[in-house]
Image (cartoon, helix red, strand yellow):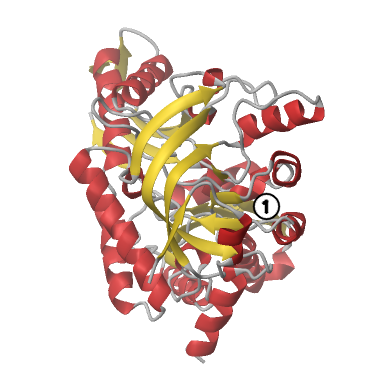
């Protein structure tokens, strides 16, 4: 049974999720990768306004491929999240960011921050860019067009499939899923 | 001398870039389809079903399988009896990459300077490897490689005393450390021997061989099978959610080395391991 999530993604919604839950996200999410994260964190450090409001927001670690004519977006799967680990706590603590969608391991600092800020880390299927693109209804670059695919895109998604990897109690699907599988084949 | 024009080369590279990014090779398709039937983990089976649906959808809609359409790794086997006419071979290849990535709506993922980091906007330059071979044909393989799995590659300058056990331990350590990051199920290219730079090239070259096709040397073929079993016993599984399908294949390439050395490189590649070849 998949859980439906609609943005804004509140602390109450986050608290209702457990590592391993399969979710379908609908609403607005923002893409940002390494280069955009650096600019956002630099703005926060300088006390300047951000190009969009991340309060109760979800950032999707992704740099989409260009859209073919007639399509809202090109292939659009997740990128590896650990590269954003040094920036994520600042965005959660200072900009109200609550959710992150990516793939792969996170640092202990990010896990601690997900717990203290009642956030959530989701994984989408890495390498399934064509499939995930089908849930994107509209795509608009709202900041840093010079960064090309690394620009911040505002995506409207409908039933975007993801899995809760780290919940706000600090449970980690990468550990739990592997342990359960290994126990099941013993 | 057989003459091949730079226009022919550019057009071929352009086509190969687009096809490689849209069409998953048959060996990887077969391995994914088989894994979806034999995988014991329920979550893992669901992930494999989505991965299969994804490559089918990419082919149907002629869109990239993965948004990371990679750096364009181009492998050239140039026959000694071939004369390239009309310009430089590397310019012709780069022009083909630029055209392919622009016309094919592929992502441009190359920055001109590793520290200054400005996008080149056409995915050039390609990462080109040249081999001079016998004959009068030109074989070009385009193998786009994503950044996420490339970041998980490793090299060790092992000691001769470490032997095959040292190689096995290093390969398993690389896969373990990569965990869910490189989009498992992965394909593992292993280079053994040569020197520091050669061994990296060997591990990349290993990824070009079909995973249905074991190493022609029986000893290395057995080692490939053993490593595949050991990797899949780790339980990392598809996307790292747990399961018996962590890798779809292990390919080894080896080369002579120095009496003091046992270099080993592990090139980890995602489930979208792509390559397309043309012979001119």
Please identify the quarter of the rendering in which residue B214 is found. bottom left
Q: Which residue is mark 1?
A: B258
Judging from the image, mark 1 belongs to the subunit labelled B
Check the image and report above or below for A39 versus A83.
above
- Whether residue A110 sits left or right of residue A174 in the image: it is right
| Residue at the far left in the pictured view | B60
Q: Residue furthest top?
A: B86
User: Mark 1 falls on what kind of element?
Assistant: loop
Q: Quadrant of residue B138?
A: top left
The answer, for residue B1, to whether it is visible in the render is no
Residue at image point 52% right, 37% down: A31
Q: Is residue B21 visible?
A: yes
Q: Is residue B241 left or right of residue B47?
A: right
Residue A131 position within the rendered picture, expressed as x and y whole percent measured from the top left: 32, 49
Horizontal arrangement in the rendering, residue A78 relative to residue B36 (left or right): right
Nearer-the-camera pick, A21 or B142: A21
Report the front residue among B39 and B259: B39
Please tell me whether residue B226 is drawn above or below residue B207 in the rendered image.
below
Where's residue A21, x and y in %? Answer: 49, 69
Q: Position of residue B149 (x, y in %)?
A: 53, 49
Q: Is residue B25 above or below residue A174?
A: above
């Amino acid at each position: 049974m998949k859980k439906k999530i609609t943005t804004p993604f509140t602390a109450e919604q986050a608290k209702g999720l457990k590592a391993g839950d399969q979710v379908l996200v609908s609403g607005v999410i923002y893409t940002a990768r390494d280069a955009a994260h650096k600019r956002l964190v630099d703005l926060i450090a300088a006390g300047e306004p951000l190009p969009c409001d991340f309060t109760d927001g979800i950032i999707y670690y992704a740099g989409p491929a260009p859209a073919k004519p007639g399509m809202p977006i090109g292939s659009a799967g997740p990128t590896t999240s650990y590269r954003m680990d040094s920036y994520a706590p600042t965005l959660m603590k200072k900009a109200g960011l609550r959710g992150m969608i990516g793939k792969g391991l996170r640092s202990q600092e990010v896990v601690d921050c997900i717990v203290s800020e009642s956030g959530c880390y989701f994984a989408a299927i890495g390498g399934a860019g064509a499939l995930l693109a089908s849930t994107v209804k509209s795509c608009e670059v709202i900041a840093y067009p010079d960064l090309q695919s690394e620009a911040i895109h505002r995506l409207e998604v409908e039933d975007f499939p993801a899995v809760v990897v780290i919940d706000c109690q600090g449970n980690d699907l990468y550990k739990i899923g592997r342990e359960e599988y290994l126990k099941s084949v013993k | 001398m057989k003459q091949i024009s730079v226009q022919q080369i550019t057009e071929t590279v352009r086509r190969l870039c687009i096809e490689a990014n849209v069409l998953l090779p048959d060996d990887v398709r077969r391995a994914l389809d088989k894994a979806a039937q034999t995988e014991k983990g329920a979550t893992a089976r669901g992930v494999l079903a989505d991965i299969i649906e994804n490559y089918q959808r990419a082919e149907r809609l002629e869109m990239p399988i993965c948004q990371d359409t990679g750096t364009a790794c181009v492998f050239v086997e140039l026959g000694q009896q071939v004369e390239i006419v009309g310009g430089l071979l590397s310019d012709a290849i780069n022009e083909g990459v630029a055209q392919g990535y622009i016309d094919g709506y592929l992502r441009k993922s190359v920055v001109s300077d590793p520290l200054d980091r400005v996008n080149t906007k056409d995915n050039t330059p390609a990462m080109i490897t040249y081999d001079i071979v016998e004959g009068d044909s030109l074989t070009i393989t385009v193998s786009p490689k994503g950044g996420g799995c490339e970041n998980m590659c490793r090299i060790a300058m092992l000691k001769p005393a470490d032997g095959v056990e040292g190689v096995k331990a290093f390969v398993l350590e690389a896969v373990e450390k990569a965990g869910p990051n490189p989009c498992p199920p992965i394909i593992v290219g292993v280079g053994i021997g040569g020197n520091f730079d050669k061994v990296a090239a060997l591990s990349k070259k290993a990824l070009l061989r079909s995973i249905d096709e074991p190493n022609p040397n029986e000893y290395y073929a057995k080692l490939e099978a053993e490593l595949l079993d050991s990797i899949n016993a780790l339980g990392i599984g598809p996307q790292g959610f747990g399961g018996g399908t962590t890798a779809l294949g292990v390919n080894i390439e080896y080369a002579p080395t120095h009496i003091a050395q046992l270099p080993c490189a592990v090139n980890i590649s995602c489930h979208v391991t792509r390559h397309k070849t043309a012979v001119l």
